[in-house]
Each structure stands twice: as structure tokens, then as C-alpha cells.
Amino acid sequence: MNFTIPDVPVSLNRLERMHWAVRRRYNMDWYWKVKVYAQSWNNNEKRKATVKIHQIRARKLDKDNLYGSVKPILDGMKGWLIHDDSTIYIDLTVTQETGKPVRTLIEVN
């Protein structure tokens, strides 16, 4: 299943500096974005899923911030697109490039 979200998540550094209430709202926003853009697919099997997330953003992030930035996306997928976000249940690849318009491309197999 492939889907595109017309937004990119903030870096891990910025996410960690958010007030807890703002971060909660931010995570819920991403939860609903994932639900809306991937509404036609459901996977409750306890099998290992391959998740590829490609971000097209204005500026590139370093690798640890890039992988940390997808935490809200994975939390939004947990329980219905993927069983869990641990390495037992997903094989995660995150890539990026610069460009416009900013967007996040997600592939789940």
C-alpha cells in the first residue's frame, strides 16, 4: 500500500523541545493524517511489515533527526497498519530529498 501525506514531520530536536500539550496535539494531528490518507487498508496480522517513508522537504535533516521525525507517523500506524513499531514487527527505511511541495510518501508491505 502506498499513500502520500502533503506534509512532513518536524525534526526530532524540535519535537523534543515542544511543550507536552503541544506535542500531544501534534502527535494526534499526525495520527489523523495517517488515518485519513491510508483509510482503505487495515492490517492486524502479527507479521513483520516493511515500511518505507520518503520525505520531500525544504531542508535535509541529519540521519538521527530524520528517523526520529517519523515517530508520530509510526505511532499513527500502530495497531491497524502495523502491529507495533518495534523492530520485531517492522523493517523501517527512511529517506529524504529536497524539493517542493513538501510531502511524505509512505509505503507499507
Image: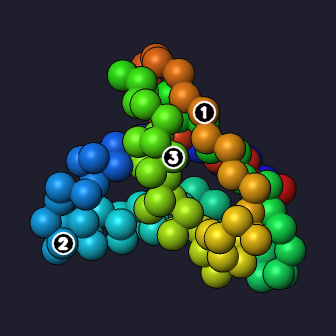
Looking at this view, name the residue that lies furthest to the left: 19
Can residue 71 be seen? yes
Q: How crowded is mark 2: few (under 14 residues within 10 Å), some or many (20 or more)?
A: few
Residue type at the position of mark 1: Thr
Identify the residue position indicated by label 1 in the image. 95
How far apart in space, not on screen, are marks 3 and 2 (Cα)?
20 Å
Q: Residue furthest top?
A: 99
* Residue depicted at x 51% and y 69%: 75
Vertically, is 9 above or below 19? above
Q: Is residue 95 left or right of residue 50?
A: left
Amino acid type, callout 2: Trp
Name the residue tied to disc 2. Answer: 20
- From the viewer's side, name the closer residue of 106 and 6: 106
Q: Which of marks 3 and 2 is nearer the N terminus?
A: 2
> Could you say whether the residue bearing mark 3 is in a helix, strand or loop?
helix
SS class, disc 2: helix
Whether the residues at callouts 3 and 2 have beta carbons within 8 Å, the answer is no
Q: Residue placed at 17% from the left, 59% from the top?
A: 18
- Image mark for residue 67: 3
- Disc 1: CA contacts within 10 A as few (<14), some (14-19) or many (>=20): some
| Quarter of the image where the C terminus is located | bottom right
